[in-house]
Amino acid sequence: MVSSDDRYKDNGVIKRKHYERELNRLQEELVKLQYWVKEEGLRVCAVFEGRDAAGKGGVIKRITRRLNPRVVRVEALGTPTEREQGQWYYQRYVERLPTAGEMVLFDRSWYNRAGVDRVMGYCTEEEYEEFLRTCPEFERMLVESGTILIKYWFSISDEEQERRFQRRNADPKRRWKLSPMDLEARARWQEYSRAKDEMFAHTDTEHAPWYVVHADVKKHARLNCISHLLDQIDYEDLTPEPIELPPREQRGEYERPPIDSQHWVPARFGENPTAD
């Protein structure tokens, strides 16, 4: 789609300078939100789900880039341990939910049961049916207890996913992102589509709706998702005013040890300092 807006290229993709300007503005707003969450003791839980290579991780990185990890943390759980496999299914996720004054971003979540577990046969039919039945009630309990639950699904076309997989495979710095699971998911596109549709049919509820992010253009997906996230919480600007920095302590009679007595990292770029 071609846009007449001068912020966009001829192919409809936002120009880099406008993207960076808007992203910076949104990140400033995220800092304000962070102060508000901390001050008001809010519990915010954001779930990020979607196709492999849809850009969930990139959005999460842009959200957290300027934020305090003690207030806003990311949870990206791996394969459950043997002990966790014997627990109530939601248990290991409950342990990582936000406390008062905290926001948690789940890079994949309890919805593994409706996606990869279902398609790859990692759960029984009974376990899958139990998840579809209990998930809406689990989320209702979260919401009614005061947790702000926001769920995002990143939608990407088959063609764009293929392009991103090819780029990852060609780039040694990104090749680690191509896991055997990703390759299997690539081969089972139709099965994952069916699983996603069934998941939405059971869990796209009034108290915890799914918000779908069109993710074929990464820059647009990042700006749209962050903008929407900010809209979900009424917050005020509690950013503190600049403080007056105290004067530095004047040098006294203490004499520092020789600087060459320290083990310096070799200065392959620039030069080692003459004082610290």
Image (cartoon, rainbow, N blue to C red):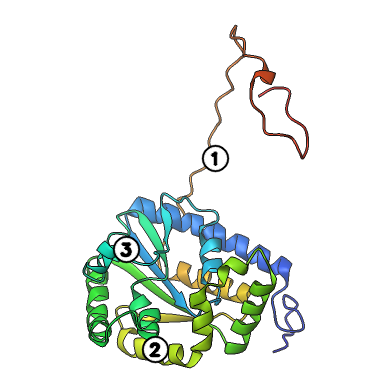
Q: Position of residue 121 (x, y in %)?
A: 35, 83
Q: Position of residue 241 (x, y in %)?
A: 51, 43
- Pointer 1 residue: 242
> Looking at the rendering, in which quadrant would you find the C terminus?
top right
Dividing the picture into quadrants, the one containing residue 148 is bottom left
Q: Closer to the camera: disc 1 or disc 2?
A: 2
Q: Closer to the camera: disc 3 or disc 1?
A: 3
Q: Position of residue 201 (x, y in %)?
A: 34, 90
Question: What amino acid is at disc 2?
Answer: Ala
Question: What amino acid is at disc 1?
Answer: Pro
- Pointer 2 residue: 195
The CA span between labels 2 and 3 is 25 Å
The CA span between labels 1 and 2 is 51 Å
Say which label, 1 or 2, has the lower sequence index.
Answer: 2
Q: Residue at x 69, y 22 (%)?
A: 275
Q: Residues within 10 Å of mark 2 (few under 14, many from 20)?
A: some
**Residue 272, relative to residue 212: is it above or below?**
above
The CA span between labels 3 and 1 is 47 Å
Q: What numbered label is drawn on residue 81?
A: 3
Q: Is residue 169 left or right of residue 64?
A: right
Say which label, 3 or 1, has the lower sequence index.
Answer: 3
